[in-house]
Image: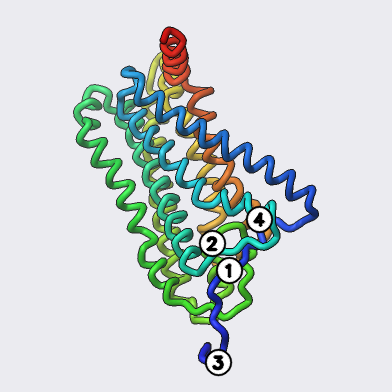
Amino acid sequence: MNVANQTRVTEFIFLGFSGVLYLRLALFVIFLTVYLLSLMGNTLIIFIVLMDSTLQTPMYFFLGNLSFLEIWYTTATVPKLLATCLSQVVTISISGCITQYYFFFSMGATECILLAVMAYDRYLAICSPLRYSFLMSLQVCLQFSAGSWIGGFIAPLLPTILISYLNFCGPQKINHFFCDSDPIFKLSCSDTFLAEALGYTCSSVVILSSFLLTMSSYGNIVVTIIKLSSREARKKTFSTCASHLTVVTIYYGTIIFAYVRPPAKYNFTMGKVISVFYCVVTPLVNPLVYTLRNKDVKKAFRKVLARKRLL
């Protein structure tokens, strides 16, 4: 498209969730409460894992990584969401929008990889218990952790570079509460085919490959559990990975629906609603699931509280 005679847009305006003031204020209170609880819950998990020596294991090392990731993952989008609930004019510069896009998708890709690593850790612990300490040594855990972060931040790099070369000539209103891919492409007056194709390919590859690796690990875990002779042993073994499986189900259930699909099928209203789940709700679900369903974490939490009372 010829953009020579068109005015270049320098900033975008988030539309967020439209509606009457009292409804937006109600949404603000809900989102702020969930956001603060998410920050506190994930920070608490990191603190407990660092403070309790019984949790110095690969499983909780990766859980600490996940909680640290969730703090920044939700912080990348929720502040703008809260702002759109209070004001009808919330802006972001083009460079700020592209930066938000990059960090949001980088942390999303990191979470996909990290969840696959956590599933592999449970697979080794259950299917190869005698070699587990050797296969999941501290050095291996550090390598897996670094690989998750590095891989996650590399994955959306090329699509982000292509987006930075797009021209935006108006309108400047983003029908969303953060700089998601479809709203950005919708507003561009350049040819977005290459950026869209590469972006959706990268998203699909990261999401589906991580999901398949995760399901493969759990498939082997299920086979191993079925072979156990004692019902009590099967129940105890499955309980060690039930929390992680719950988180995986909720997270992949939303992002696969949101990003593994043809671009033409995108619905902006539905997209915003689904985004609330993986931007706001899921980061809170993780600490809730791991603290309410995990006996080791609850025991460690009580020990930390008892230690604080004695001081």
- Looking at the image, is 276 positioned above or below residue 59? below
Relative to 301, does residue 197 appear above or below in the rendering? below
Question: Which residue lies at the image location 28% right of the left edge and 44% below the top edge?
Answer: 146
Q: Earlier in the sequence, mark 1 or mark 2?
A: 1
Which residue, given by chain and number where applicable, does mark 1 sit on?
12
Question: Spatial distance from mark 2 to mark 3, Cα to Cα?
Answer: 26 Å
User: Image quadrant of residue 111?
Assistant: top left
Single out the mark in the foreground, 2 or 3.
Answer: 3
Q: Are marks 3 and 4 in contact (CB under 8 Å)?
A: no
Write the residue at 34% across / 40% down.
117
Residue 37 is situated, as x and y percent measured from the top left of the image, at 57, 33
The residue drawn where x is 36% and y is 58% is 155
Name the side, left or right, on which 150 lies relative to 214.
Answer: left
Nearest the camera: 219 or 79? 79
Amino acid residing under circle 4: Thr
SS at mark 3? loop
State the CA–CA distance, disc 1 to disc 4. 13 Å
Mark 2, other Cα within 10 Å: few <14 / some 14–19 / many ≥20: many
- Residue where numbered disc 2 is placed: 179
Residue drawn 40% across the image and 27% down it = 47
Distance in Å between CA atoms under marks 1 and 3:
20 Å
Query: Which comes sooner in the sequence, label 2 or label 3?
Result: 3
Badge 3: residue crowd in 10 Å (few <14, some 14–19, many ≥20)? few
Residue picked out by circle 4 = 84
Q: Are dots 1 and 2 in contact, CB under 8 Å? A: yes
Q: Earlier in the sequence, mark 3 or mark 4?
A: 3
- Give the secondary structure at mark 1: strand
Report the residue marked by disc 3: 5
How far is the residue under mark 3 from the one under mark 4? 32 Å
Q: Secondary structure at mark 2?
A: loop
Give the answer, above or below, for where 86 lies relative to 115: below
